[in-house]
């Protein structure tokens, strides 16, 4: 007798690791933003500028990276119909895109002007990432949500949609890493932060947490949904004859 066991192996452990990594990133970021406010803006400048400086990393990391990561994995953790999953995926990505837009908007509110905040590799990568994310969201809406598109078109576009989505997510994490490096290097060069202090440990830990989160999200997204076991043959012996019914 040959029995085929095709069971969906749970991705609970990977999803749990994603949630733990995201929680760690959120805690480290909030600790840095709320307890080390002088690193974002000196007390001599208005409180309004401090709020904008703190809002930028919060919106770009928690609002953009963490929420878009959840959107990528909607098809893994959300029960229900495919249409429901697509709707939640589209909605979460819309929230992430809105957060990114507001995150960039906060940098336009600086006292030094727009040009002063958009000169570095970090800022250029950020603009590229958010622009690509917006195009990806619009194309996903027109292709997978709009009923006018033919099924064959969706099948052809799907691999590219997945690739560009994961690429954009990875680019967002890399952009955040360059922002952390740029910020910490600036603070240490100007003597605001020591190389060996609690704030440096938090920022470095935040960077490692983002790298781990990115890897686990992508691994969970590309891992097969089902694992088929090797067919098992049950052998029976009768009257010294080998039978395989």
Image (tube, rainbow, N blue to C red):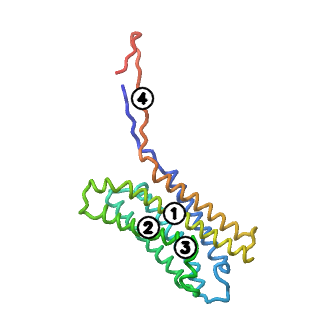
Give coordinates of residue 216: x percent, y percent: 53, 55
Counting residues from the start of the chain, the first of labels 1 and 4 encountered is 1
Which residue corresponds to mark 2? 132
At horizontal 54% and vertical 69% (from top left) the residue drawn is 61
Q: Which label was assigned to residue 92?
A: none
Depth check: give the residue in front, 90 or 175.
175
Give coordinates of residue 136: x percent, y percent: 39, 65
Q: CA distance from mark 2 to mark 4?
A: 48 Å
Which residue corresponds to mark 1? 171
Q: Which label was assigned to residue 123?
A: 3
Give the crowd class for mark 1: few <14, some 14-19, many >=20 residues within 10 Å.
some
Q: CA distance from mark 1 to mark 4?
A: 44 Å
Counting residues from the start of the chain, the first of labels 3 and 1 encountered is 3
Residue 146 is left or right of residue 237, and the answer is: left
Which of discs 3 and 4 lies nearer the camera? The answer is 3
Q: CA distance from mark 3 to mark 2?
A: 14 Å
């Amino acid at each position: 007798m040959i029995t085929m066991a095709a069971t969906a192996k749970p991705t609970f452990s990977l999803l749990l690791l994603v949630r733990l990594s995201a929680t760690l990133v959120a805690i480290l970021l909030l600790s840095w933003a709320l307890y080390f406010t002088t690193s974002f803006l000196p007390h001599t400048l208005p409180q309004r500028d401090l709020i904008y400086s703190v809002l930028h990393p919060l919106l770009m990391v928690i609002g953009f990276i963490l929420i878009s990561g959840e959107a990528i994995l909607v098809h893994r953790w959300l029960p229900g119909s495919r249409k429901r999953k697509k709707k939640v995926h589209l909605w979460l990505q819309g929230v992430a895109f809105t957060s990114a837009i507001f995150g960039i908007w906060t940098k336009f509110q600086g006292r030094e002007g727009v040009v002063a905040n958009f000169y570095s590799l970090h800022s250029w990568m950020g603009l590229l990432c958010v622009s690509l994310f917006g195009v990806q969201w619009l194309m996903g809406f027109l292709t997978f949500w709009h009923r006018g598109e033919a099924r064959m078109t969706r099948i052809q576009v799907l691999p590219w949609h997945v690739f560009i989505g994961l690429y954009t997510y990875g680019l967002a994490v890399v952009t955040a890493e360059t922002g952390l490096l740029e910020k910490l290097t600036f603070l240490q060069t100007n003597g605001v932060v020591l190389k060996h202090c609690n704030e440096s440990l938090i920022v470095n830990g935040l960077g490692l947490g983002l790298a781990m989160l990115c890897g686990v999200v992508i691994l969970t997204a590309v891992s097969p949904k089902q694992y088929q076991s090797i067919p098992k043959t049950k052998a029976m012996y009768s009257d010294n004859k080998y039978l395989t019914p």
